[in-house]
Image (cartoon, rainbow, N blue to C red):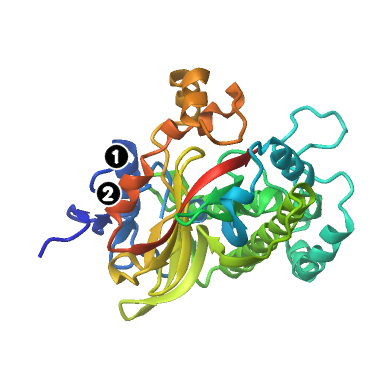
């Protein structure tokens, strides 16, 4: 029987099943996955999504913090509105400006005591109210990890960040208007992830465990740091969820301020994490699934797979494919590093690639230009047995940090 995936199998290693037909799968990524495949606690095999690029990942009895990453709980949220395309103004620049005013984004370098533009100087009332749901858990974390008190936590709640994070206004196949955004647990999540990556490396040294790659340092279940890590990641995922909800509320408010048309909005797919861990049951065992750059796609489960800032995005429904541990891709996946994109893509090419999208068209965002990513249509074709497409979205406005 023909399968939708390809298998890499070597003696002494767990198999690697990759849903990468028709898309690039570079040698560095393959080597990284082969290193992971040597780890003794991998359950069954490693499932590789079509957006694969250098990064790491399903484990039983242990967790590799670097495979989860430092943007803990990073994910997507999408809302469908009652607006139609023809109700949007011809120019969306005022709307983009209003969103940028409502949602801190980007990051100031060397701001010398002033406010980092990517954070709140003094968090407004709605932010401090949203923080109340997170505060008790944060205080418990700070009792065990006092360094977290000095992180960007409350002042990063409801902020976008940089890199591939975005806020978009999109049109679906019926010209209905959607709002979609992508962000995670910001500075505090990064600090939690970094701390436990370093802690795992120290443990490997202390236990004289030699690894093919230091970034594969792991925390065994039942060890001193395991429950601490699980608790910290769970809180960071909650932060990421609230962060997206607050940003969505403020984005919708910004649209209402600019657009003199009353409209309703309801969530279609929310808290669609793609950098996280989850306790699940697969192939007769309870396992810790690490999804790094992957989305849960259980049968009937809704998810979001975004393209680049000039391409289509998709609202999808999971098909519950157990061979992928019920997972699908989280996006298109990079084919150029940020440095390479800035060297290879001209500003004129970026402007052409984002024609028709109200977005930044300056040299500072070329690392996010569409050609730096795999073609999203090929990525979707490669995982046709993992998800079905429910809505196809095309962005008309994109806010980047």
Callout 2: helix, strand or loop?
Answer: loop
The answer to whether residue 70 shows anywhere in this view is no
The residue nearer to you, when weighing 211 against 271, is: 271
Callout 1: helix, strand or loop?
Answer: loop
Please state, as top left, top right, bottom left or bottom right, where the C terminus lies in the image: top right
Q: Is residue 298 left or right of residue 11?
A: right
Q: Residues within 10 Å of mark 2 (few under 14, many from 20)?
A: many
Q: Position of residue 197 (x, y in %)?
A: 56, 51
- Whether 389 is drawn above or below 8: the answer is below
Residue at the image point whose x is 54% and y is 61% from the top = 273
The answer to whether residue 195 shows anywhere in this view is yes
Q: Are marks 1 and 2 in contact (CB under 8 Å)?
A: yes
Q: Which residue was labeled with disc 1? A: 24
Distance between mark 1 and mark 2 Cα atoms: 7 Å
**Image quarter of residue 60:** bottom left
Q: Which mark is residue 221?
A: none
Q: Is residue 197 left or right of residue 260?
A: left
Q: Which residue was labeled with disc 2? A: 20
Q: Is residue 58 left or right of residue 124?
A: left
- Whether 292 is drawn above or below 335: the answer is below
Q: Residue furthest left?
A: 1
Q: Position of residue 22 (x, y in %)?
A: 24, 44
Residue at the image point whose x is 51% and y is 53% from the top = 175
- Whether 223 is drawn above or below 362: the answer is below
Q: Position of residue 131 (x, y in %)?
A: 80, 63
Please state, as top left, top right, bottom left or bottom right, where the N terminus lies in the image: bottom left
């Amino acid at each position: 029987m023909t399968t939708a995936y390809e298998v890499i199998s070597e003696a002494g290693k767990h198999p690697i099943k990759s849903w990468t037909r028709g898309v690039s799968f570079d040698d560095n990524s393959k080597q990284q996955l082969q290193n992971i495949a040597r780890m003794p606690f991998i359950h069954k095999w490693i499932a590789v999504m079509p957006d694969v690029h250098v990064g790491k990942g399903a484990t039983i009895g242990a967790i590799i913090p670097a495979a989860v990453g430092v943007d803990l709980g990073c994910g997507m949220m999408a809302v469908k509105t009652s607006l139609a395309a023809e109700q949007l103004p011809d120019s969306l620049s005022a709307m983009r400006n209003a969103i940028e005013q409502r949602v801190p984004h980007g990051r100031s370098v060397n701001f010398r005591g002033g406010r980092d533009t990517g954070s709140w100087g003094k968090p407004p009332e709605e932010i401090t109210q949203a923080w109340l749901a997170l505060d008790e858990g944060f205080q418990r974390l700070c009792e065990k990890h006092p360094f977290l008190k000095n992180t960007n936590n409350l002042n990063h709640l409801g902020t976008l960040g940089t890199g591939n994070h975005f806020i978009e206004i999109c049109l679906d196949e019926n010209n209905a208007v959607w709002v979609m955004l992508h962000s995670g647990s910001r500075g505090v999540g990064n600090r939690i992830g970094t701390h436990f990556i370093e802690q795992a490396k120290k443990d490997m040294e202390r236990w004289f465990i030699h690894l093919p790659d230091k970034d594969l340092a792991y925390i065994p279940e039942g060890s001193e740091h395991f429950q601490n890590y699980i608790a910290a990641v769970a809180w960071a995922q909650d932060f990421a969820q609230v962060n997206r909800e607050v940003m969505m509320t403020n984005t919708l408010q910004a649209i209402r301020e600019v657009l003199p048309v009353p409209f309703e909005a309801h969530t279609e797919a929310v808290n669609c994490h793609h950098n996280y861990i989850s306790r699940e049951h697969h192939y007769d065992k309870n396992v810790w699934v690490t999804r790094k750059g992957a989305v849960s796609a259980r049968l009937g489960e809704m998810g979001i797979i975004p393209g680049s800032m000039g391409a289509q995005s998709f609202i999808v429904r999971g098909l519950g494919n157990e061979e992928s541990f019920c997972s699908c891709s989280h996006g298109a996946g990079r084919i150029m590093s940020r440095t390479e994109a800035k060297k290879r893509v001209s500003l004129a090419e970026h402007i052409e690639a984002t024609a028709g999208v109200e977005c930044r068209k300056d040299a500072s965002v070329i690392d996010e230009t569409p050609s730096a990513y795999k073609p999203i249509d090929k990525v979707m074709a490669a995982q046709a047995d993992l998800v079905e497409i429910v809505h196809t979205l095309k962005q008309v406005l994109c806010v980047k940090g």
